Image (cartoon, rainbow, N blue to C red):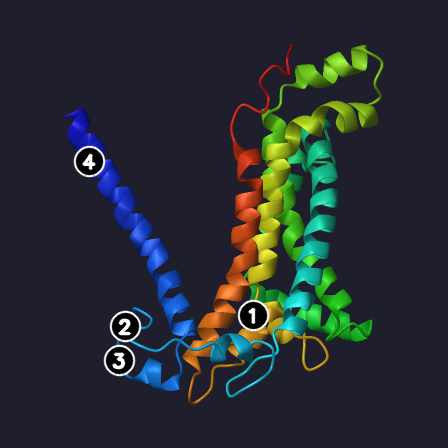
Amino acid sequence: MPRLFRIIKTAAILGWSAFVIAPFLWALTTSFKTANGVTAGPTYLPYVDYEPSLAAWKGLFGSGAGSIDIVGPFAASMIVTLSASAISLVLGTLAAYGLSRFVYKVGPIGNNDLTFFFVSQRIMPPVVLAIPFFLMLGFFGLLDTILGLVIVYIALLLPIAVWVMVDFFNSIPRELDETAMIDGCTPIETFWRVILPNSLPGLVVAGIFCIVFGWNDFFFAFTLTFTETQLLPVAIVSLNSSVTPWWSLSASALVSVAPLIVVAFLVERYLEKGSLAGARK
């Protein structure tokens, strides 16, 4: 029975891995094809089924048919996503620590209600927020600007950071705070010297969520920009026309997903369990 279970588990893992990897392999092979190679039918092996070409990859820098100047949108997406994620993570961590360690009471409203208020901001459909954001940015002259998008993304990402960090801070024993204060630390010093170093896995998870949601957002990047500012998802979608250049679309999609893969590999080691081992000693 244990051997059968291992076989089933291995088969399930391999099947799921193939299901996940197949779209990336399809995009990779398509990115090295030309228009004729795409329309000729299913071809998979370079130099066997088709003659590979770098036309799509060269087109990412604005040369050739079906090209897209990806440098500007890529840089804009990096600036907006990283800035909004960093600010959201800082503000969200501070807010989450306060909600986790201190008691707030205004009439019937308490800590749980405040936490739910933050989380509820992600429940609303994005289209509900589109007009208010559009009018607000238009009033301050921030439409079609990177700063305007950063402000909007902070509003979208901050609830994610608060939600993740409140749950993580609640899992950290309060004895750590009490011990630090007995040793003479102020609440701020306790947070900075004791709690925050032990919160690294939670910070990483919250940061990943913020980066993923910010990087992949299309709706607000599309509705709040026009010509001066363009983020990568909008630039990729703009390739779609009556005759879709699948080769360029595949290459740009791979470039779009590459930063998230790099981030996942870099922070994987911080996600291991046991980071609080010995913290109570």
Residue 122 visible (yes or no): no
Q: Position of residue 79 (x, y in %)?
A: 71, 61
Residue that badge 4 annotates:
7
Q: Name the residue located 26 percent from the left edge and 80 percent from the top edge.
A: 41
C-alpha span from label 4 to label 3: 36 Å
Amino acid of disc 3: Gly
C-alpha span from label 3 to label 2: 14 Å
Question: Is label 4 in a helix, a strand or a loop?
Answer: helix
Amino acid of disc 1: Pro
Question: Mark 4 or mark 2, which is nearer to you?
Answer: 2
Location of residue 179 with respect to 134 vertically, above or below? above
Disc number at residue 233?
1
Instruction: Tell me where residue 148 sits by quadrant.
Output: bottom right
Q: Position of residue 23 (x, y in %)?
A: 36, 63
Residue that badge 3 annotates:
41
Disc number at residue 48?
2
Instruction: Tell me where residue 139 sits by quadrant.
Output: bottom right
Cβ–Cβ below 8 Å for labels 1 and 2? no
Q: Name the residue located 30 percent from the left edge and 68 percent from the top edge.
A: 45
Residue 187 visible (yes or no): yes
Question: Mark 4 or mark 1, which is nearer to you?
Answer: 4
